[in-house]
Amino acid sequence: MRELSLHILDVLQNAREAGSTRVDLTIEEDLVEDRLTIEVRDNGRGMKEETVRRVLDPFFTTRKTRHVGLGLPLLAAAAERCDGRLDIDSAPGQGTRVRATFRHSHIDRAPLGDMAGTLLSFLLGEPPCDLVYLHRYGERAFRLDTDEVRRELGEVPLSHPAVREWLGIYIEEAEKDLTCSAAESA
Amino acid sequence: MPKLKSLEDLKKLREEAQRDIRVRLDTGTKITVGMGTCGIAAGARETMHAVLEELKKRNIEAHVTTVGCIGMCAAEPLVDIEQAGYARITYGRVKPDMIPRLIEEHLVNGRMVEEWVVGRIQRETQ
């Protein structure tokens, strides 16, 4: 995957397929500690301990459409080659937490990339799933809670053409603002 | 300074959207993009972005959504177009630069792009 945001989209889709109705995605860019952390917490069905042990095996998957599951192994490899690691906590009925860390300045660390594209792709998927997104960059932060967005929208779905356009631009501008202004004030 | 959009915009948007929402959801066109690991790695997110852009440019209303892996990983990115009353067509290896032609031929002219089709499902007759 060329961007970390593509890995993130992949993990978010796992959460949806686990039957989650709410996902918390947190990205923390700690420039002082030189650390980038991505954490996805869902309220899906969770996994047994034995399953958790096997998800990093590329030849393990729960799906029936194919025999390999590369999503998490690819993310683990990406983290490990950047002095980081992948941790997975899960229990049946308790949801799953996936946490990947990277050395922020590592030469092999892929750029975060198009987070607006990733979040929009996830939010347009079915069945609907709420997302609480928090992106910290140094001292600054951007937060998006789709539950708040839905409350403003009433019966109008996030997939409505006008809404999805708004979401794309809203996230893109906020992300740009987050990283650009932080760079200026540094 | 970028002109930052705010949650306040949503109020206005809601009023405008409420009027046409039922029509759109019941009878519209549905475009589904494969977004499993295989699709994502093959560029499905960018393909989906191109679909959204093209629909906006041509002012075509369609429901756009994603699906996980359907087992045809080698043909990703997969784009599936479903229109009321027509067969459901699945296109394979759809790159963003193919989208303008796909939308024009399939949605505007009503002809499928034969050479890109990897699957079709006839509409069930009730």
Image (cartoon, coloured by chain):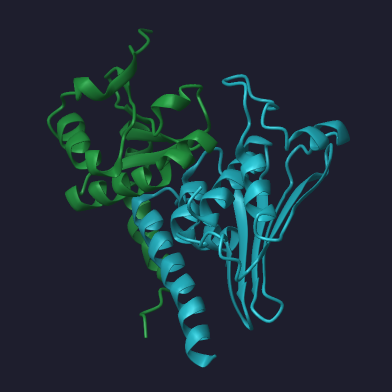
Residue A114 location (% of width, % of height) = 45, 59
- Residue at x-position 37% and y-position 86%: B1
Closest to the observer, A131 or A154: A131
Res. A173 image quadrant: bottom left
Residue B78 sits above or below residue B87 on the image: below
Number of marks present in the image shown: 0
Closest to the observer, B86 or A50: A50
Query: Which chain does the cyan colour mark?
Result: A
Residue A170 location (% of width, % of height) = 43, 67
Q: Is residue B40 left or right of residue A70?
A: left
Quadrant assignment for the C terminus of chain B: top left
Residue A84 visible in this rendered orientation of the protein = yes
- Residue at x-position 29% and y-position 17%: B87
Residue A135 location (% of width, % of height) = 60, 69
Residue A179 sits above or below residue A168 on the image: below
Q: Is residue A2 left or right of residue A162?
A: right
Res. B91 image quadrant: top left
Q: Is residue A121 left or right of residue A93?
A: left
Q: Colour of chain B?
A: green
- Taking the view exactly as shown, the residue that stands out farthest to the top is B125
- Residue at x-position 47% and y-position 89%: A184
Residue B8 visible in this rendered orientation of the protein = no
Closest to the observer, A134 or B15: A134
Closest to the observer, A32 or B108: A32
Residue A16 location (% of width, % of height) = 62, 40
